[in-house]
Each structure stands twice: as structure tokens, then as C-alpha cells.
Image (cartoon, grey):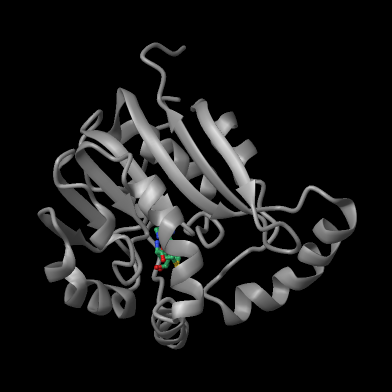
Amino acid sequence: MNKDVNHREVLQDISYPRFAAFYTWMTTRPRLTRWVDPLRREIVGQAQGSVLEVGAGGGQNFPFYDADRVERVEATEPDEAMLVVARRRLPEAPVPITLTKATVEALPFPDAHFDSVVATLVFCSVGDPEQGLHEIWRVLKPGGTLLLIEHVRAQGKRAAWVQDVLVPLTTRVAGNCHWNRDTRQAVLSAGFLLTKAREVQGGLQPVLIMSTIRPLQSE
Ligand SMILES: C[S@@+](CC[C@H](N)C(=O)[O-])C[C@H]1O[C@@H](n2cnc3c(N)ncnc32)[C@H](O)[C@@H]1O
């Protein structure tokens, strides 16, 4: 887990303005919010203390932080088009939030700094998920929680095959989104301990809701 991070090596220019505009519109549709907002409330509501949110997008999670549990949030997002939308959402947040332009692979924060890290619908798009998880591990305090909502690789062989076939298209049109990532396995391989997980929806886009901790002691 002590993989060194060379920040310059992993800095990437992430800019998908058309996807940002579409995603911003899509995530305000009542059909979607009725379904996804309870999941956001469930996972974001577990964050406590000093919180890091990675890939915050247009600030879709900001209204769901619990002011009784959270002191402040450092929200990071690499895409300027998303940051513009997130800045507009800051007044909706019930807790103080600071926005920083950064990728999850190169987080500009000290070691063992946060009590919770939140990532929702992010790891499908990250260039180097393994490096991103190493970075989250580094900035999370031992005993801190990593809270995730991610759409993931289907468990059925046929659905997973269709996901694999679709990935060249989804990465092109949806901001580098990979429909076929086994994010549960990636998180466990990075050393996090599972405290709670369930999958909802299924089909080609099963959605994983997952709470994990960075163990107090590790090799
Ligand atoms: C589908 S959006 C999800 C936005 C928001 N978290 C939500 O729940 O609606 C994926 C987000 O991940 C961001 N992203 C892509 N690559 C990233 C990276 N390497 N590090 C951090 N965030 C990244 C994108 O810019 C985008 O804002």
C-alpha cells in the first residue's frame, strides 16, 4: 500500500464538455433522481468528520451531506466543465465545501487526512483505477471509510460480454465511461475491508452500493 505517487506522471487533461452538459441535464430528470437520490442519501449520509469527495461532477451529492456528522468536504473534480456546474451547486450544500481541480490518481492532500471518502459513479471513468484507490488509501485515516456507488461489471457471462462489446462506444461518448469494470474486486484488492455491499438494478448496468474501511492496521 506504500506505492509512491509521482503527481506529475499521473496528471491528465480530462475535458468532456458535451458529456458534462448531457450528464448535468440527465441528473436533474425526475425519473432518474427518484431512483438515484435515495442511494445518494444512503451512501453520502454515512460520511462523517473531514470528508473528501472525488470526481464530484456537477455537485450532485452536495445536498446529501449530513450537517450533524460532517465538518467540511473537500470536493475534487478534474473536468472544468463539471466544476462550473459544481460551483453553482455550492449554495445547496448544508456543510462547508471546498472545490479543487484534481484527478483521483493525484490527490493534493497529505497522508491520513480524511475520515471519509465518497466516490459515486466515478471509477467507471478513471484512467488508472488502481492508482486512484492507492491515493484514496493514502489520504484516508486508518479506520476511515470509503463509500461508493458504482455501476459495475455484470455477473452473468452474456451481459458481461455485451458490456465488453459496448465499452469502445461508451468510453467515446460518455466521458471515458467503462461499463465493464469489476470495481468491487478493485477496491478489495487495494486492501479495503468490506462492511456492507449490495447490487441493485442488474442487467447491463448493475449498480453497486458499497461501504468499506481502511483497516486500522495493514502490512
Ligand atoms: C458520471 S460522472 C459522476 C459525477 C458525480 N460523482 C455523480 O455522482 O453524479 C463521473 C465523474 O468522474 C470524473 N472523473 C473522470 N476521470 C476522473 C479521474 N481520473 N479522477 C477523478 N474524477 C474523474 C468525471 O470528470 C465526472 O465528473
**Quarter placement of the N terminus:** top left
Compared with 74, 168 (above or below) is below
Q: Nearer the viewer, residue 71 or 8?
A: 71
Percent x, y of residue 81: 32, 80
Compared with 105, 218 (above or below) is above
- Please give left or right for residue 203 compared with residue 89 in the image: right
Percent x, y of residue 200: 63, 52
Compared with 207, 33 (above or below) is below
Q: How many marks?
A: 0
Toward which corner of the image does residue 116 lie, by quadrant?
Answer: top left
Q: Nearer the viewer, residue 188 or 207?
A: 207
- Seen at 23% across and 43% down, the residue is 51
Q: In terms of image quarters, where does ligand 1 lie?
A: bottom left
Q: Is residue 105 visible?
A: no
Toward which corner of the image does residue 142 lie, by quadrant?
Answer: top left
Percent x, y of residue 97: 14, 57
Percent x, y of residue 50: 18, 38
Q: Nearer the viewer, residue 143 or 189?
A: 143
Q: Is residue 39 visible?
A: yes
- Please give left or right for residue 156 compared with residue 99 in the image: right
Toward which corner of the image does residue 169 lie, by quadrant?
Answer: bottom right
- Seen at 31% across and 45% down, the residue is 45
Name the outermost residue toward the right.
158
- Seen at 79% across and 47% down, the residue is 155
- Seen at 20% across and 72% down, the residue is 89
Compared with 206, 14 (above or below) is below
